[in-house]
Amino acid sequence: MRKIKNGFAFLGLIFLGILLMNAVQQDKALTAETEKETMEMKSVTNPEVKDGNDYNVYALEVPAILDFAGEEVPLHLPDIKERMDRELLVNTYWQSNGLLLFKRANKYFPIIEPILEEYGVPNDFKYLAVIESGLQNVTSPAGARGFWQIMKTTGRENGLEINSNVDERYHLEKATHVACKYLLEAKKKFGNWTSAAAAYNAGNAGIGRRMEKQQVDSYYDLLLGQETGRYLFRVIALKEIFTNAKKYGFNFDEKHLYTHIPTYKVEVDTAVTNFASFAKGFGINYKILKIHNPWLRENKLNNKSRKKYKIAIPEKGYYTK
């Protein structure tokens, strides 16, 4: 009986060994297939890749001269150069986000740029909107909203309507006017555009207190927290990358970019009980109406004051085959 048991045990060990060998062979096959797929993916994104040893990530040369709004960046200072290098690297090698920013900029910069010019605010400030929101109507944890990330108090102080029906922080043109007013006030207070840009992020009072406490008068001389410390460098990095797209590896044609859809304005001075029905009256649906009027926050408009609102309606042919 003992010999029979030992025989069964021996056969069991052999069977287990065969299973383990099959598992190892399957694992090797799977690993080889995964490596093959990885190399095929690399070959698509970089045709020059022949094997794993040919995949490279390159350091970037920080330009000898950079400026923001005509004010030169002091790149001769080691810490300034390192901070600039960081933002160039981060924004260059985040390729998917970079391409999306190029696409959106083509759609929205033509709206922002003329308003900046109207106020005498340098064109470079359009990149603040890119940094603030990625050119999207987003909401921050602190409650700032829209492309320019305007707080409720700031918006109301500058004439924006903000309530459950309407939030004009989401109205790109009106929000850009508010941003310009804020920047002009900051420029007047600090005397230069660089500090004005930093103040847009940290507030006039915040930058003012730090300068007084640290006994300096330049953004580049301030010891700041992570967000405000990186803020202007991110803006300058995007300006550099946008200005020299191919130099930083971004390749696209005009057809790849998003475009602004022309609209006409319909004036409304009464209540609107249902914007879905309102949209149908103009041959569009509620979704399209909200895309072009994100400042309308509900499916209705109370408008007890009989205020005149201008609602954008896309021209015919853009949402039909």
Image (cartoon, rainbow, N blue to C red):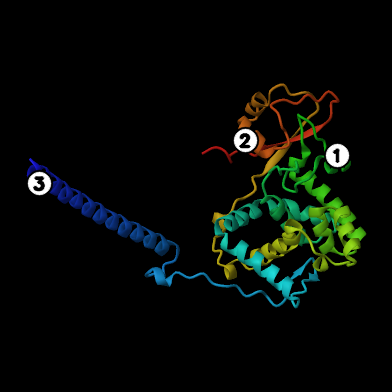
Task: Give coordinates of residue 11: x percent, y percent.
Answer: 12, 47
Residue at 80% x, 55% y is: 116
Identify which amino acid the numbered label 2 is placed on. Ile
Return the residue nearer the eye: 238 or 252.
238
Label 1 with label 3: CB-CB less than 8 Å: no
Q: Which residue is mark 3?
A: 7
Q: Name the outermost residue toward the top.
A: 273
Near mark 3 (Cα within 10 A), the count class, few <14, some 14-19 or many ≥20, is few
Looking at the rendering, in which quadrant would you find the N terminus?
top left
Secondary element type, mark 3: helix
Q: CA distance from mark 1 to mark 2?
A: 27 Å
Q: CA distance from mark 1 to mark 3?
A: 89 Å
**Nearer the viewer's eye, disc 2 or disc 3?**
3
Q: Which residue is mark 2?
A: 288
Rendering quarter of residue 255? bottom right
Secondary element type, mark 2: helix
Return the residue nearer the eye: 155 or 275.
155
Identify which amino acid the numbered label 3 is placed on. Gly
Q: Of the numbered discs in the image, which one, if any, rests on residue 156?
A: 1
